[in-house]
Amino acid sequence: MDLQSPKTVTRQSLYEQVWTTPLRKLAGTYGVTDVALAKVCRKLNVPVPGRGYWAKVNAGHPVEQRALPRTAKQQAATITPVRRHPESPPEERIPRPETVTSIGSIEVVAIDRPHRLTTKTRRYFQDVERRLTQAKRRKAGTSFGAADWPPADDNGRYRCGGQDGYPLTVSLPALERALRILDALAKALESRGFRFTHVERDHQDHRTAMPPGLYVTHQDEQFRFVLREGYRRRERSAAELAEAEKAKTYLGRFESMPNAVSRSSCTVASTESARCFAIPGGRRLKPN
């Protein structure tokens, strides 16, 4: 059956079809959704099988078919298929530029002279700790100031954007270990001729512009790296749930919490294209 051109169907024909073929499968032959076909049935006053009808048919149970009403405002309707956009060809995966693969291995050591981004990131998280402390001490009924509003909690982790330092999502206990990794990486990159630049959001052309954030630039290429601490789900005990119910507070069955394992990703961008690469594996963020 041609799925591109409109088709005209009579009441009697549609009635016979919907009682011999499930509505969703039948709708596919017309190039429409089952919701659209059900609207046509209502328009022509054609009854359709109720819920559980086809399950009974498949199980061999007796079923009752509703009769076609004698009257209807229309005796036929035209069903127009939904226009589908042609699928785009898969993009060819481009290899990592040599500038990325030539960085080599980096040794993570204790921070002696912190990189400027390390200092900036540490100050950002110090402010996060300050706001969290003030939120705990806040008295009921008092409001927060603009600079004292508690930071967003992402499963026990807090996010630092590229404008505030390193692009980092981490829990406070694992912060220092994450800073050691990023400090060593920043120093190694700059010693090899790379430089850090911050890309602002382009409100004029957001479709083709690169995502905002901190980028590492080398010659004609840029790449953006992000470090995130992973998280895991823990099932709460029956005692915890019972205590919450007794206190009349909602508590979900599962709790998400940081797992101290880093997940890195790298976006490599040029003037013509941008590709994302996931750096495989994870690294423990717990102190050695």
Image (spheres, helix red, strand yellow):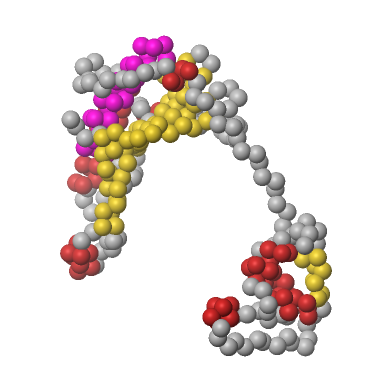
Q: Is residue 41 above or below residue 261?
A: below
Task: Identify the residue shown where x is 70% and y is 48%.
Answer: 85
Image quadrant where residue 28 sits = bottom right
Measured as percent of width and height from the top left, residue 107 is found at: 27, 20
Image quadrant where residue 238 sits = bottom left
Q: Is residue 256 above or below residue 285?
A: below
Measured as percent of width and height from the top left, residue 105 is found at: 33, 20
In the image, the segment drawn in magenta is 171-194
Residue 191 part of the magenta-drawn span: yes
Query: Does any portion of residue 127 appear in the rendered image?
Result: no
Q: Looking at this view, is 192 or 158 the one in front? A: 192
Task: Identify the residue shown where x is 58% and y is 88%.
Answer: 62
Residue 151 part of the magenta-drawn span: no
Left or right, 73 with respect to 145, comes to right
Which residue lies most toward the front here? Answer: 60
Measured as percent of width and height from the top left, residue 169 is found at: 34, 37
